[in-house]
Every structure is written in structure tokens, then in C-alpha cells.
Amino acid sequence: MSNNNNSSNSSNLNNEDNKTKTIQNNINNKNSKKSKKILTTFLIFILSVFLIGALSVFGFTFAIIKTSPPLTIEAVTDLDQASQLFDANGEFMDEVLKAEKRYVISLDEIPLHLRNAFIAIEDERFYQHSGIDVQRIIGAVITDIKKILNKQTGLHGASTLTQQVIKNTILTNEVSIVRKIREIYLALELEKQLTKDQILEIYLNTIFVGGNAYGVEAGALQYFSKNAKDLTLAQSAFLAGSTQHPTRYYSSAINSSESQFYKNRALTVLNKMLELGYVGQEDYNKAVEEINNDQIGFNIKKFNDSYNYEWFARPVVEELTKDLKEVYGYTDEEIKLHLRNDGLKIYTTMDKTLQDHAQNILDNATNYINLSEWTDENGIIQPQMSAVVIDFKTGHVKTIIGGRGTQDANSYNRAASDKFLRSIGSTAKPLTAYTPLIDLKLGHAGTGVEDSPLSKELSDKYEGWDPTNEVKNNFIGYTNIRYSLERSINLSAIKIVDTVGIKNSLDYGKKFGLHYNKKSESSIATLALGQFNNDPTDIDGGNSLILASAFSVFANGGVLTEPITYTHVVDKNGKVILENKPDKTQVVSPETAYIMYDLLKGPVERYSSKPAKFNDIPVVGKTGTTENNKDLWFAGTTPYMSAAIWIGADKPTELKDKYGNKPFSGSTASALFGKIMAKAHESLPPIDIPRPQDIVSANICSVSGLLAGPYCSSDPRGSKVYTEIFVKGTVPTHTCDIHVPVTINSLTGAIATASTPEYLKETRVFLNRKYTPSVYLSDQKYVAPKVYDDGSYELPDNNDNLNQDGVDPDEEWFDKNDTTKPPADNNNTNTTPPPTDNNTETTPPADNNNTNTTPPPTDNNTETTPPADNNNTDNNNTNTTPPPTDNNAETTPPADNNNTNTTPPPTDNNTETTPPTDDNNTNTTPPPTNTDKFDPPIIEETPTIPTPNPTPEVGNDSNNINNNNNNNETTNQSNTTNNSETENTQNENLDSADFDFG
């Protein structure tokens, strides 16, 4: 029974073991399946990542390939299709210069050892691969990994000759994975379309070898002055060695101290050629010896890279480059590639005939003007000059002359480069003084001013500035805006800018295109006189292109048309890829432009700029002369075109004429303007610009700038009534109160009193000045006396010493001991107009048959007085006769021949002609004459401009800027409702040592 129990127990134990094993096996099976599942999942994940990455790379690569430029045989074989420039008539003018020089030759003209030299060093398996060299790529990768691990720079290149052809002709030198993928793809495609020899020929004609040379023929000429077919083995090895660092290679060839660089590289080429069996040992040894012993035979040649029309072509390429960037988003490198290879046709605005003519005029300028010339240390003729002519309706620049003499490559373009800016002198006055005054309606063309010293208040405002005339203490007295601009009176411009405000003046200057640095922006000398700071590190000012464009505004209805140098660009398939249309900006109102145009006739028709005139075409403009005559300018316009001329030295130097005297803008720059513009206007009919509807006319007094009063025509110097033009709504509403009648003692000139004998009483017209100046004003002798007759005088024994007015000419108010002599030209210390009287110009004869106009009387101040317009009753007369303010070098206004009530004023024979008689007035008593000889000539310096009310109403008497100042004894006359004018106490002048007078 026990045995049975034992057996039973044993059986139970076995069953338990089996169950345990079964359970364990089940657990193991489950774990195994789980592990396999995890492994499978992991492998699937890795494979998925790989596939996704591969697909991404493939997609990325495919996208790059799809956006690659099209591969055409023409794209890589048309190597000599540089873009061309054509003139305004469609005639060939220039070829766009490439940075490189390339001369395409056939493979037959390239010696075998030269071909093999490049193959050996650049692509030794060239004839075995299909566009890319896999073996070389693997080698390059291994080399680059080693460099990275060793923290070295300069990765190893692996481009084949085929890849380099793609890069040199279709792609750019950009370093990126995108360009590399495109390069590989296009290289594989190119190998399917061209033979190996065709690819090698293209490569050898496009590879950069340093300097300006692209291709082996250009390289052979540059380094050895010989053709590629004549190169020795050593020279061929040298040329092939240039491809790694071409710029440094060129430098090592021309600098003996760096020669070891090219020697090492050339010897590397020879070693590779020997290794590959391209050269025998004997030839190898000879070539090595030549290289090591500096016997390679250099004969360096510099290529001529000048344009036929250097001054015009480069600005065209610069403008085109800017536009291609804006329109197509090209980089500089891409633009160079297009201009170099795409055969573009660029149609410019250049008038070739006028360009040649203008260049000839400036090259031979001293045949036409009196100017001394010399040659500087660089062999460049001095003084230099520039000129620009613009058709302002279209914006087409017809002529750009950037200098005289030879037109070397990249020469200093003095006409159109922003790197060439100079002070422009008084040429700035119309732009930053007179134009804003009129455009902002702070004054009008006849606004009165007074030339007298600065008030202390105004001087203090500008840090104690106390400018004076060239000849000190000589001033005109009363004058006006028209005369001030005509004679370039500096004080007038200063006071106008003070009236307008520095900020407003600056804003107008910028609208006209002038450049200002920080110092110039706040300088009244800059804004009023064109005296720019021109710091060499921050240059400012203007050039001929800027000024020609600016002055065109006055003849173009106030519109500034952007100057352009080309009209359109056509690709080699005839498709227009660019059309150039200029922007147009309304800078000032049409009315302001018209008035400025009319004012600017004065300098040309009646003053120093007469040489600018030609034919019968109207010319308006302004000269400019900078400090010490360093720059001479003339800028002006006709109804057709505008132009500007500059004369000066590259290093600012005082200019002299052939006799060592100072030259004048009027007789130099103006004269060149006239000669160039005469050619430009051949066959054009004489027309003038149209008058805007809102321009009106009115008779005013030239002294006060107010409506003519009953005494203005009886000024002792002649009638001061003339017809002026105005913007509608700005005609003055008050009447002149400067001309006043005063009854005097004709013997003493004192104001008559009850004690004055009746037979000595005489009523005359005088000027009203409410202060006594401390300096001499040339019109002071016509100012009303302030002394009353007290009867303390004795009658002479006879009348022999009395003039016709009963006055002893030796008993005048002024100090007879004052020896000050007024200057001939105070308004412009640098541009005194050439003398005419007693020199080259005769006084015109009197018109004794005066039926239309009285011929201009002259004085001995070298300037003729223009004829009075005795029939000028038409208030629409757009050619206003500028009124005189003094008998000295100033025009006599037209006599009022229709005024039957006006008694002509008396005159004297002090260099002043008797005003014209009223031929239509049978009741007029002829004026008596005066033998008084002391009537100083007009001081053409800087008349003063009274500041109008800060915000004058249209039609008020802001048309007066007359200033009275006697240092600390100044009495101001303010505007009053009883027809008084503003007498501004802000009087200024310029010191010729500090400022330019043009």
C-alpha cells in the first residue's frame, strides 16, 4: 500500500514539473514573439525614416533640377555676344565693356601641350567620365573629412571641366548646394549633346586666368603679349596653374616679391604632366629650369577697357543695372553675366552729333574763352570742365561731357557722378531763395529790398555774422527782387532765405536735386549763396546733370522730369525686356515757374550772361562763382532744352585768365553754354513758353514794390513805374510811399520854410528814408532832406556857379572828404561783368525819332541801360522791363508816355541819361538838367530784403522787403495801412574772403 502511495506521489510531482515547464515555455514563447515584434517595428521605423529622407532628398533634388536654367547649345557656345549700345538715332555707339577680356579661338589654334596642361591639373579623367568624376568626388569627400577633423579650412574641389563650362556660361560663381546640384545635372546633360573636344574648346575660351583675361588667348596676350599658339611648355604650365587662385596668381606675376607663388603652382602642373605622360623628361627639365630661373618670358599687357563714349556709356550701364535689379531682382553677378553674354541691344538717348560737338568745344575751350590752363601731376589738363544737355519734356539726356582731354577707362565723370559734387555759388539763388519766396507767396517779382548793412538783430541771429561788400561800405540802397536776381546781389538772397526760413529753403533745394550734408543743411551761406560745406568725407553740392535738370523746371511748367539715359532694351531675339519711362514731379506751381523763367531772362539779356545767347531762341539762366574763383558755373534753359556748364580744377584751385586776372562765369561758362546750345537748337524755330492763365500784370513802383503812386514817375533818376507780372491774387494793394514831394530851397537843398524866398522854393520828388545811414548808400542823394531852411546863407554875387536848379554843386550834403569809390560790380565779388563803356561797347545813340522805344542810355559803369518801353500799356506784357533802382548800371524803366499829367523828372548829367521825353504828351515841360557830377555808380552787391509778415495775406504788402539799417542807429518802417511799405531792418552783405559771389 505504501508503494502505491509512493508511485502516486511521484506521478503527481512529474505532472507538476510538466505544468511548470509548459507555463515557462508559454512565457518564453510570448517574450520571443514580443521581441520579434519590437525589432520588426524598429526596422520598419528606420526604413521609413530612410525612405522619407531619400524621398525628401529626391524631391528636393528634383525641384532644383526642374528650376535649373534651360540648357541650349547656344547658351554655352555663343561666347562673344556682348551687349551693344545705340544712340538716339539707332546707330551703333559702344559695346558694353566686360570686366573680362576674351578672344575666342578654335581648338586647332591651341597647342597640344597647353590643352594637356589644363587636363592634367584640372580633370585628368576628362576623356573617360560622362560629365562628373565619381572617383574624384569620393577622393574629395575623404580629403574634406580629414580637413574637417583636423579643423582645417579650404575644402577640396571636384568639378570636372564639363561642370566648369556650365558654371562659366550658364550659372554663376555662387557657392551653394543648389548651384552644385544644378551644375551636376546640366553637366551630365551637356555631355550628351557635345563632344569632348567641343567641351574642351569652350572651357579653354571661358576659364578665368587672372587680371582681366578670360580664356587662354586673352591670357597669353595679357601675360606674354603673344598668341596662345606660340606659348612654350613653361608658359603653358604657368597659364594652367592660374585656375586655383587667379587673382593672387596675376599679382605674383607682376610683383617679383611674390613670384614663388606662381612658381610652385607651375611646377605642380609640370609634375602632373610628367606623371600622366603628357611630357617627356627632357622637355620637363627645360621647362622647370625656365621657371626656376625667372626665364619664363613675362611681357605684361594691360587691356584698354575704355568706351568710345566713356562719359555717356558708363552712366547708361549704371542706370540699366539699377533698373534690372528693380524689375527682375537680378544680383550684380547675374547682371554682369547678362550684359556679357546675352547680346542685349540698349537704345540710349545720346545725340551723337551734339555729344561730339560739345566734347570738341570743351576740349578746345581756351580757343573760345579767356582762361589759363595747365597740366597736373597726373598729366591731366586743367582746368577741367563738364556739360550736360537735357530734353526736359522727355527727360532724355542728350549730352554728357564728363571732362576734357582723353577719356580713360573709369575716368572721373565730372558731369554725372554723385561722387563729383561741388559748391554751385550763386546758381543756387534761383532754386533756394527766389523760387520759394514766390512759390510760398511771401513776395513777388517786384518786391522791394534795400542794400544796406545787416541789422544787429539779424547779425546776432546768425552768430554775429556781419558780412560786407567786396568794396566795404558801398551799398545801393533801395532796389527790388527782379534787379537783385539779375545782378546776383548776395544780400538780397540772404534776406530772402531768412524770410522764407532755413527749412523751407532746404526743402526746395532737395526738391531740385541738390545734395546737402549735415553742416550745409543749417547754413544760410549754403542756402542763400550756394556755399556748400563739401567735406571730403561727406561731399555735397551739385553737378552739371543735377543743375541742368533743376533749371529745366522753370521752362517746363514747374515739372521736374527725371533725366534718363536709355529708352528701352531688346534681347537677342528682338523682345523688349525693359522700357524706361521717366518719373515726373510737380516741384513748383506753373505760375511760379513762369515768373522765375521771366526773372532769369535778366542775367542773360541785360547782364553778364549775354554770351549764353544764340540765334533768336530765348535763353534764361544764372551764373555761379565760388570762393576765390575755384568753380565757374552757368545753368539755364530754353523752351526746348536745359543745360549746365562747370569749369574748375580737379583739386579746387583759384582760376585765372591768360593775363593772371580773375575770370568770370559770364564770359566763360555762359559762353560755352551758348556754343553748345546753338548746335543743339539748329533748325528749331524761336518760340517762348506759354503764359499760364493765372499770371496777371500790374504797374508798380520799382523802388517800393507797391502799386505806382502819383510821384513814382517823377523820381529824379527817371520814372520808376513799370509793368510787373504776378501770380493772380498777389498784386500789391497799397500804393508807394517811398516817393514823396518836398518843397525845398533850391539854393541850399534844405526844406523850405516861411523864411525861404518864394523864388527859391521848388517842389521836387525825393525818396523817403526814415533813418540816416552810417554808411554811404548810392541813392542817399535822392533822399528827402531832413534840415529845414533857416535863412542862414548868402546869395551869390552872380549865377555863374549855380546849376539850372540854382544849387551850387560843390555844396552837397555828403562829406567831400569821403574818398570811398563805389565798386563796378558789388553784387558778385567773383563775377564782375566785362566792361563795355570806353572799352568794347559803345553807348547807343539816342533815338531822336522816338516813335516806339527810347534807346537805352548808358553810364560809365560798363553796362547799357535797356530801352524803355514807351508803348508799354499792355498789362499782359510778359517780357517785363526790369526797373532801375539807381542810375548806375541799372536799366531805366519805360517812360510813361501816356501819362499826360506827369511832369518828367529833372535829370543831371552824372553818367545818367535824361529819361525819355513823353512824345505823346504835348503838355510836358522838358526836364531841367543838373551839372552835379557826384552820382556814384550802382553797387551791384547785395541789396537788403525786408522780411515780410510771417504769414502775409495774398495781395498784402509783403511785396516789400526793404530794410533800413544804420548799425545801431536803425529805425524800422513797418507796413501801415496808409500806403507805407515794409522797410526791413535785416540788411546783410558778404565778405569776399569767406563767400562766393556768382
Image: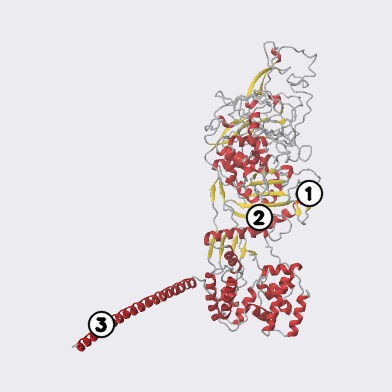
The Cα atoms of the two marked residues, 3 and 1, are separated by 131 Å
Labels 3, 2: front one:
3
The residue under label 3 is which amino acid type? Glu
Quadrant for residue 120, please give it: bottom right
Other residues around mark 1 within 10 Å, as few (<14) / some (14–19) / many (≥20): some
Asked whether residue 900 is in view, the answer is yes
State the mark number for residue 16: 3
For this orientation, the residue located farthest to the right is 659
Percent across and percent down for residue 645 are: 68, 49
Percent across and percent down for residue 232 are: 74, 79
Q: Image check: 39 left or right of 732? A: left
The C terminus lies in quadrant = top right
Q: Image check: 874 left or right of 250? A: left
Percent across and percent down for residue 359 are: 70, 56
Asked whether residue 106 is in view, the answer is no
The residue under label 1 is which amino acid type? Ser
For this orientation, the residue located farthest to the top is 755
| Mark nearer the N terminus (3 vs 1) | 3
Residue where numbered disc 1 is placed: 372
Quadrant for residue 884, please give it: top right
Compared to residue 363, the image places residue 166 above or below, namely below
For this orientation, the residue located farthest to the front is 2
Judging from the image, what secondary structure is the residue with disc 2 in?
strand
Other residues around mark 3 within 10 Å, as few (<14) / some (14–19) / many (≥20): few
Q: How many marks?
A: 3
State the mark number for residue 813: none
Colouring scheme, one of rainbow, by chain, secondary structure, one colour: secondary structure
The N terminus lies in quadrant = bottom left
State the mark number for residue 400: 2
Judging from the image, what secondary structure is the residue with disc 3 in?
helix
| Mark nearer the N terminus (3 vs 2) | 3
